[in-house]
């Protein structure tokens, strides 16, 4: 039975759901087919690219629509609802009852696509951390070494290389921040070794997942 408590559409996603409601049947069919053909392993950017390539949606519009659907899928998951019984506050999009019904029907179809279902769960599982990695940068400086008597010998007697690792992350509340770590050459070598080991372990686990027929969702 459909839920008697329609989910409100967040203001940030109203435009995306309006876009979905206004799509002609051919475009909606192509979008559904594109999502159904998504292979695994997959990632958010690949799903967006697939939808954009199969429809007349620009990459930005496709991303907005996929993000809106993932947000809704996550909310439905938290509430323990079935995708087939999702109800929306669709009067936020249109006051026409027939168009409201069409929008809800389209949403229910799309939420049952495997790609969206797995991506939304990956967002929930992968995002349950205090800090999520966003990007990294290493700044390298040359720092001169001067002798004891700079006035008598103003030229540097040597130099050292100092590397600064900047980690940019996202907090659980959505705010962004970063921290800095000073590193020497041997520290970079140690970090590189750790990352290589992580890549080897990831490759081995991906092969194991594939052998068990488990679909892998890869983070962007």
Image: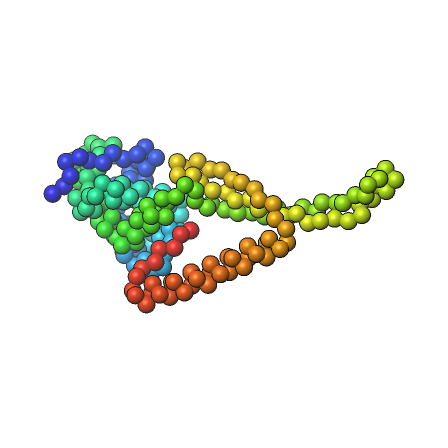
Residue, x 57% and y 44% (percent of image)? 181
Residue 90 can be seen in this image: no
**Which percent across, then down, holds residue 137?**
56, 47
Q: How is the image coloured?
A: rainbow
Residue found 19% across the figure and 46% down from its top? 82
For residue 173, side relative to residue 146 (left or right): left
Along the line of sight, which residue is nearer the eye, 47 or 71? Answer: 71
Which picture quadrant has residue 63? top left
Measured from the top left, where is residue 216 in percent x and y? 34, 58
In-front residue for pair 124/181: 181
Please, is residue 122 above or below residue 152 in the view? below
> In percent of the image, x 41 and y 37: which residue is there?
174
At a point 33% along the width and 48% down the height, the residue shown is 125
**Residue 143's image quarter?**
top right
* Residue 8 position within the rendered picture, expressed as x and y whole percent measured from the top left: 25, 34
x and y percent of residue 76 in the render?
24, 42
The front one of 137 and 104 is 137
Q: Quadrant of the N terminus?
A: top left
Q: Is residue 15 left or right of residue 161?
A: left
């Amino acid at each position: 039975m459909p839920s008697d408590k329609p989910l409100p559409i967040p203001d940030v996603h109203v435009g995306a759901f309006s876009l979905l409601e206004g799509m002609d049947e051919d475009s909606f069919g192509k979008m559904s087919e594109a999502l159904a053909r998504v292979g695994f392993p997959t990632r958010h950017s690949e799903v967006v690219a697939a939808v954009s390539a199969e429809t007349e949606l620009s990459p930005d519009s496709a991303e907005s629509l996929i993000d809106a659907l993932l947000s809704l899928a996550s909310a439905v998951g938290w509430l323990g609802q079935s995708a087939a019984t999702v109800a929306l506050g669709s009067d936020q999009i249109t006051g026409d009852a027939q168009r409201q019904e069409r929008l809800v029907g389209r949403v229910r179809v799309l939420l049952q696509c495997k790609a969206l279902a797995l991506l939304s769960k990956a967002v929930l599982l992968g995002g349950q951390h205090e800090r999520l990695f966003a990007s990294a940068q290493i700044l390298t400086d040359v720092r001169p070494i001067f002798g004891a008597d700079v006035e008598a010998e103003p030229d540097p007697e040597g130099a050292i290389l100092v590397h600064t690792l900047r980690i940019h992350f996202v907090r659980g509340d959505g705010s962004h921040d970063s921290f800095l770590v000073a590193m020497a050459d041997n520290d970079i070598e140690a970090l590189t070794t750790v990352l290589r080991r992580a890549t080897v372990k990831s490759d081995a686990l991906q092969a194991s997942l594939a052998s068990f027929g488990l679909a892998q969702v890869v983070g962007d």
